[in-house]
Image: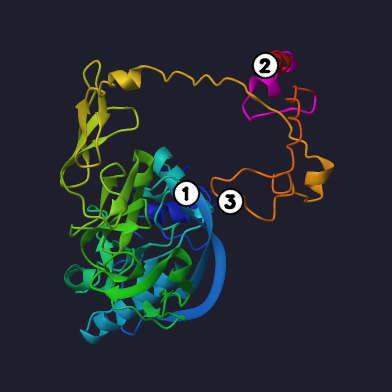
Amino acid sequence: MCNLRGLLPRCALLLALGAGCGAAPEDLAAEGPPEGIGSSQHALSSIDCGESSDVGYSNGNAFTIKLVTVDGKKVEKTTANAYYVMAQAAAAAGVHLKVVSGFRTMAEQTYLYNCYTSCSCNSCNLAAKPGYSNHQSGHALDLNTSASGVLGWLNAHGAAHGFKRTVPSEAWHWEWWGGGPGGGPCGSCKPSCKGSKIVSSDCGEGDCAAYGATCADDAKGVRCVSVFCPALGSKKVCVGQSLIGECKDGAIATGDCGAFGAYCSTAGAPEARCVSVFCVASPSDPPKPKSVCLPNGKLASCNGDGALTSAVDCPTGQSCAGASGDARCEAPASPTRAARQPPTPERRRPRCLPTRRRSSSRRAGSRRPRSAVAPPIGGSRTAASSRAPRPPPRARSRCSASSRCSRGSRGAERPELHALACSRR
């Protein structure tokens, strides 16, 4: 194996003679300094928008990546569009950019990493661990910064196109993580809003309404903004009766006031806050300082923001009483003497009501005959004018089984008392 720094031509000669320097994957561009960084291209960078897919890696996690071809190198599609727009601007200033290294497969990155760790090839240049290189995620490009005017132009204008130099020791290593004027030839779209839908740089669409949001395009860029929040700035808002949300530039994070026995309320305040259910009757009622009784019997105080500030037990022998806002601890009222003595139940004596029977003559409606002519005053009665003799008095009815006792009589409940009462009559 060749471990000769700076002697790549000699290594190439040995390869021709059958010696080995470690098998490099096809079309591998070395990591710093790659071959070609000093070359200048006098025509605009070439780009082929024919798409292909490969496996990319970000922080060790695999994903499917879409690639196009720029200057003969595979480059992630959106990165390629951003680079091409920047290359056009550089060409207009007389500076010609070229992609020396773009996307790397796992095999390519593994080769470079082994060269770095074993210091047996690629001039022992620094390389990221496989799966963690930004060349594998599609964000990094190695450019021809040794060519005349290229590095100076990139330092002055690269950031305006979203490109940044992220490795201080590698002037050729530039990364794109979004930004710039947008556009590009490979099915690229400028991020924008289409109603509630957001259009991304790869022309894909997503509906913000599916997340309770709307699309906004302002100084913060194109993004989904919660319908409860202003697009810019910070604010606390109510999301329903119990949820409170904290907004920042259209994004929202929520908390539940109901978990603390409170409402979310904006009544009487510029921003939402949690208000105790013991301090207001409903979320629309502005809170005010007052005293209230809690369900556990404690006397509590509410402040002007609707929060409970204290809760104390009433002294022994007292209880919390009074309407909301005028609650206080007080002793129970002493009952009056009349109220303390239970009422004496009324004792009622039973009485028996005999059943009255009418004679047949009375039932027939007959009356005793009377004299047709009244006797003279002072005169004597004659046999003709005297009234008919009265019938003998009827015997007084005795109590019997047919006797009726008044309601409430004990005889109605106990037959032996009924008989006793009747016998005493």
How many numbered marks appear? 3
**Residue designated by label 1:** 131
Residue 72 appears in the rendering? no
Q: Residue at x 22, y 41 (%)?
A: 307
99 left or right, relative to 274: right
Question: How far apart are the alpha carbons under marks 1 and 2?
Answer: 114 Å
Closer to the chain start, of discs 1 and 2, is 1
Closer to the chain start, of discs 2 and 3, is 3
Q: Residue at x 32, y 49 (%)?
A: 263
Residue type pointed to by label 2 = Ala
Q: Report the quarter where the C terminus lies.
A: top right
Q: Residue at x 76, y 25 (%)?
A: 395
User: Residue 133 at x, y = what percent?
Assistant: 41, 52
**Residue designated by label 2:** 421
In the orientation shown, which residue stands out farthest toward the right? 360
Q: Mark 1–mark 3 contact, CB under 8 Å?
A: no
Instruction: Single out the mark in the foreground, 2 or 3.
Output: 3
Q: Residue at x 54, y 75 (%)?
A: 51
User: Residue 243 at x, y = what percent?
Assistant: 36, 52
Instruction: Single out the mark in the foreground, 1 or 3.
Output: 3
160 left or right, relative to 102: left
- Mark 1, residues whose alpha carbon is within 10 Å: few (<14), some, or many (≥20)? many
88 left or right, relative to 327: right
Instruction: Please identify the quarter of the rendering in which residue 41 is found.
Output: bottom left
